[in-house]
Image: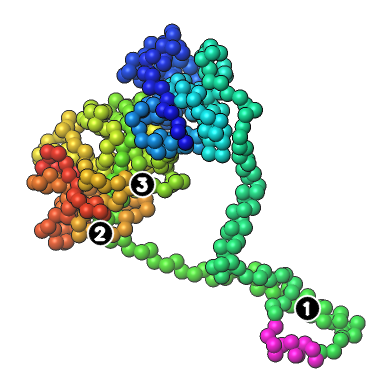
């Protein structure tokens, strides 16, 4: 599908064109700009982050030098996102809608009917473009000649809408078939009917003569007594089985889920001067809790106290090491689902940490992919799902995270009180599963957290 890249119009020129009374620069705060354009619309902190992310996505879609396959992947992700939404945020208008329309509409104008509404076409993008240019919701006035010509009756392929009831039945049948294939399916026992007799029992039944009416009443009474006794037996609760003893967890840095992360986008936190909000791909599968989708990738939103310590430009499109199994925390209204590892100088005895830096991010090996496991040599093992905050695993082990004379990152068991008895003559280097050591740029003997 030969989809032409959209317009690379700058943010100030887009704002000037569609909102002449509003001024903007290349460094404008997008969420504040959106609030000034739509003063009657309230945006949550997460929505403000999302607005910034979509403006960045529109910039990436407008790149003229992007690989055709990657460009098609971005369009496919956007099309899927819009399949269940009226606007980028769901139903609220934002400056991101106008920016995306400005940068995408020139390409949509050139799309063929197959690209627009064919079986593999971008139906929802076309519908969205038509909505933005015609709906009063966005408060923009576009001359008729400048609008993308869209014929709502020219639809080449109609996708069958998903019926929730049918989908539920389909999943139910699949589950039943899976249970049957695993040998879990059994014929239900009907109340009032006995279990099937063995071969010997059938002969005995055949030798019994038909009872008289009087005998039948006696037999019926006896049967009722047996049923009553049976019910009493069922009412009696079965004795509780003793709980299996909890599996003892051996303290080890392998309990911490360290992975290669790819920062796709980072912005300043709207409510905290010291924080950045980063969108990071950590190799999670679709549907993982506390994740979302961004540019066709499953990502986590991560808050880090690096604003003022590391330039924002250095937080864009780079690989880092992330701690991925800490319990998510909300930081000034934004839920953070991971932590970025960074190194800072070790404090001297009695010295107070004034958070002045310097700070350096931990760099994974060159070529390591997002989601790849990172571990300390000599401490291999499976990480916990989510670390229990009450057990303070991270707080206990973090003092052992350090940097070496050759700028590597390592684990020093001797610095952890609970591991004093462990042979700590050799530092365990932090390495990737595919090989290669994690490094910092200049800080030796530093604290890593």
So how many labels did they put on this image?
3
Residue at image location 44% in from the left, 18% down from the top: 35
**Quarter where residue 448 is shown:** top left
Distance between the alpha carbons at the discs numbered 1 and 3: 63 Å
Pointers 2 and 3 in contact (C-beta within 8 Å): no
Q: Position of residue 200 (x, y in %)?
A: 70, 90
Q: Nearer the viewer, mark 2 or mark 3?
A: 3
Q: Position of residue 84 (x, y in %)?
A: 55, 35
Residue at image location 47% in from the left, 36% down from the top: 1
Pointers 1 and 3 in contact (C-beta within 8 Å): no
Instruction: Tell me if mark 2 has few (under 14), some (14-19) or many (20+) residues whose alpha carbon lies within 10 angstroms of its own.
Output: few
Residue hosting label 1: 223
Residue hosting label 2: 380
In the image, taking residue 161 as reference, residue 139 lies left or right, namely left
In the image, taking residue 342 as reference, residue 60 lies left or right, namely right
Q: Which residues are magenta?
A: 197-207
């Amino acid at each position: 599908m030969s989809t032409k890249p959209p317009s690379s119009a700058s943010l100030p020129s887009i704002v000037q064109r569609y909102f002449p009374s509003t001024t903007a620069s290349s460094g404008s705060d997008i969420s504040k700009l959106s609030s000034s354009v739509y003063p009657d619309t309230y945006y949550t902190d997460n929505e403000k982050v999302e607005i910034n992310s979509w403006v960045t996505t529109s910039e990436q879609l407008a790149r003229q030098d992007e690989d055709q396959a990657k460009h098609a992947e971005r369009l496919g992700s956007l099309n899927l996102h819009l399949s269940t939404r009226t606007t980028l945020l769901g139903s609220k208008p934002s400056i991101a809608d106008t920016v995306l329309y400005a940068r995408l509409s020139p390409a949509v104008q050139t799309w063929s009917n197959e690209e627009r509404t064919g079986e593999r076409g971008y139906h929802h993008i076309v519908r969205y473009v038509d909505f933005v240019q015609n709906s009063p919701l966005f408060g923009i006035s576009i001359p008729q000649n400048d609008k993308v010509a869209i014929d709502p009756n020219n639809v080449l392929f109609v996708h069958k809408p998903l019926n929730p009831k049918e989908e539920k039945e389909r999943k139910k049948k699949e589950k039943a078939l899976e249970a049957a294939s695993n040998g879990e399916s059994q014929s239900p026992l009907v109340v009032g009917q006995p279990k099937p007799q063995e071969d010997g029992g059938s002969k005995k039944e055949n030798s019994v003569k038909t009872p008289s009416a009087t005998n039948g009443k006696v037999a019926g009474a006896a049967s009722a007594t047996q049923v009553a006794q049976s019910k009493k037996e069922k009412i009696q609760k079965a004795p509780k089985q003793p709980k299996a003893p909890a599996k003892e967890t051996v303290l080890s840095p392998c309990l911490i889920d360290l992975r290669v992360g790819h920062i796709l986008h980072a912005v300043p936190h709207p409510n905290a001067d010291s924080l950045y909000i980063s969108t990071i791909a950590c190799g999670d599968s679709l549907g993982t809790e506390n994740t979302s989708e961004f540019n066709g990738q499953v990502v986590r939103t991560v808050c880090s106290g690096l604003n003022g310590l590391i330039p924002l430009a250095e937080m864009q499109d780079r690989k880092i090491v992330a701690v991925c199994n800490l319990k998510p925390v909300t930081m000034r209204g934004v839920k953070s689902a991971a932590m970025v590892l960074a190194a800072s100088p070790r404090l001297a005895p009695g010295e107070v940490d004034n958070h002045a830096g310097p700070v350096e991010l931990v760099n994974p090996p060159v070529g390591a992919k997002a989601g790849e496991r990172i571990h300390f040599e000599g401490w291999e093992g499976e990480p916990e799902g989510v670390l229990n905050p009450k057990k303070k695993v991270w707080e206990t082990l973090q003092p052992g995270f350090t940097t070496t004379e050759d700028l590597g990152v390592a684990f020093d068991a001797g610095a952890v009180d609970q591991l004093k008895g462990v042979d700590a003559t050799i530092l365990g280097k932090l390495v990737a599963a595919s090989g290669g050591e994690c490094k910092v740029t200049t800080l030796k003997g530093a604290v890593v957290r």
